[in-house]
Image (cartoon, rainbow, N blue to C red):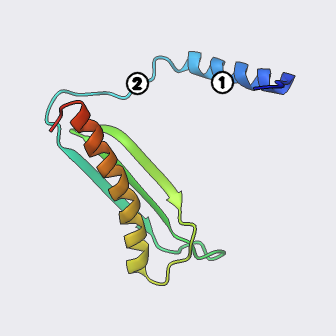
Amino acid sequence: MHEPTIQHFQALKRLLRYIKGTLHFRLPITIGDLQLRTYLDIDCATDSKDRKSDSGFCSFLGSTLITWSVKKHVIVAKSSTEEENLSLSSASSDILWLHRLLAEFQIQ
């Protein structure tokens, strides 16, 4: 920000063109139940190079997808139970954040 170059302006123009071209993309928000649901999946150490696991979760408010995450674990777990606990910890943090956010909007 202090010394922008031509490359920075080109990247900014590219970003703005992308945003302009995707203004019609929207997440559908449907009327209905406002039950918060989260689904979690773990891929246990299938990468033979580093033996790290991948995990992902997605959260829905009713039938509307509101958040998701996919990431590779930074450590090698000693067991599948440890991998599951790492993934559940990450998903639980997100659920708690969503619960507090929904409470601010007075959604029970």
Residue 101 falls left or right of residue 17: left
Q: Which of marks 2 and 1 is in front?
A: 1
**Sequence-first tag of 2 and 1:** 1
Residue 20 image-quadrant placement: top right
In the image, residue 68 sits, relative to residue 7, either above or below, namely: below
Q: Position of residue 77 (x, y in %)?
A: 50, 78
Residue 90, position in %: x, y? Answer: 41, 59
The residue carrying mark 1 is: 15
Residue 56 horizontal/vertical position (percent)? 43, 57
Query: Is 106 left, or right, of 76 in this rendering?
Result: left
In the image shown, does 69 or 92 lie closer to the viewer? 92
Question: What residue is drawn where x is 14% and y is 39%?
Answer: 108
x and y percentages locating residue 41 in the rendered image: 38, 62
Count residues near mark 2 (Cα–Cα under 10 Å), then give few for <14, some for 14-19, many for 20+. Answer: few
Q: In this view, does 15 lie above or below 43?
A: above
Q: Disc 2 marks which residue?
A: 26
Amino acid type indicated by mark 2: Arg
- Callout 2 touching callout 1 (CB < 8 Å): no
Instruction: Tell me if residue 106 can be seen.
Output: yes
Q: Residue furthest front?
A: 2
Q: Which residue is drawn at 23% across and 30% down?
A: 105
**Residue at 49 percent of width and 84 percent of height:** 78
The amino acid sitting under disc 1 is Leu
